[in-house]
Image: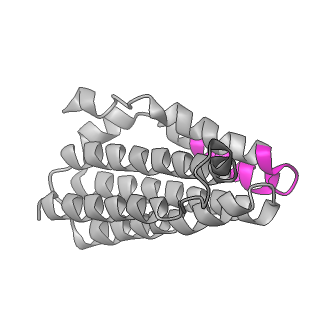
Amino acid sequence: MNTTRLEAFSDGVIAILITIMVLEFHTPHEATLAALRPLLPVFLSYLLSFVILGIYWNNHHHLMHITERVSGSVLWANLHLLFWLSMIPFTTAWMSDHHDEPVPVAVYGAVLLCGSIAWLMLKARIERLEANVKLREAMGSDLKGKASLACYVAAVPLAFVSPPLAIGLYVLVALVWLAPDRRIESKI
């Protein structure tokens, strides 16, 4: 089967996840700028997670454009990815409420780590299914992906030492991926 249905479903899920996250914003009872100050951790957590989901959406779009067909195992690998992405709104809300506490920051990182692993599994499944030479050539050694995974692996235990440093690693990974990844575009 072709990728159209899988891509449309994934787009819809990611759009819903972003919508769910924004619902965590509650309007202040006062009409002052000072009333917004307590919302800053919520906004910054939302911004980080919005960017991360946007990165997955963008890269998923590119991945599907270099993929000619999908199988049942690719559909399941994609659902596995979407499961971990669907945990981002919950962990974002928890971390925004307790950004100085190690457990919520570590759990947020664990979800990002699992999402990263699921992404690599989806990509590998597509490469195996199609013997997708274009995808393999585009990804190369995937240093960016491996470095991101390493940052998440390091950040989860680091959250128990310094939650702000762990969050800093999550931000670093997002910043690295914020620059468009042109590897796949160059092969299309």
- Which residue is drawn at the image coordinates 56% and 42% (left, top)? 146
Instruction: Name the residue: 47% across, 37% down.
Output: 142
| Residue 61 visible in this rendered orientation of the protein | yes
Q: Position of residue 19 (x, y in %)?
A: 39, 61
Question: Is 183 one of the magenta-colored residues?
Answer: no
When the figure is inspected, residue 178 is found, relative to residue 77, above or below; the finding is above
| Colour pattern of the rendering | one colour
Q: Which residues are magenta?
A: 148-164
* Residue 169 located left or right of residue 188: right
The part of the image, by quadrant, that contains residue 184 is top left
Query: Which residue is most to the right?
Result: 161
Q: Residue at x 24, y 65 (%)?
A: 9
Q: Residue placed at 78% from the left, 42% from the top?
A: 165
Q: Pick whichever, 129 or 121, lies toward us.
A: 121
Quadrant placement of the C terminus: top left
Quarter of the picture containing the N terminus is bottom left
Residue 66 horizontal/vertical position (percent): 21, 43
Residue 143 in view: no
Residue 11, quarter of the rendered image: bottom left
Residue 33, image x, y percentages: 62, 43
Q: Position of residue 156 (x, y in %)?
A: 73, 56
The residue lying toward the viewer, choosing from 55 and 75, is 55
Q: How many marks?
A: 0
From what the image shows, is residue 61 above or below residue 19?
above
What secondary structure prevails in the magenta region? helix
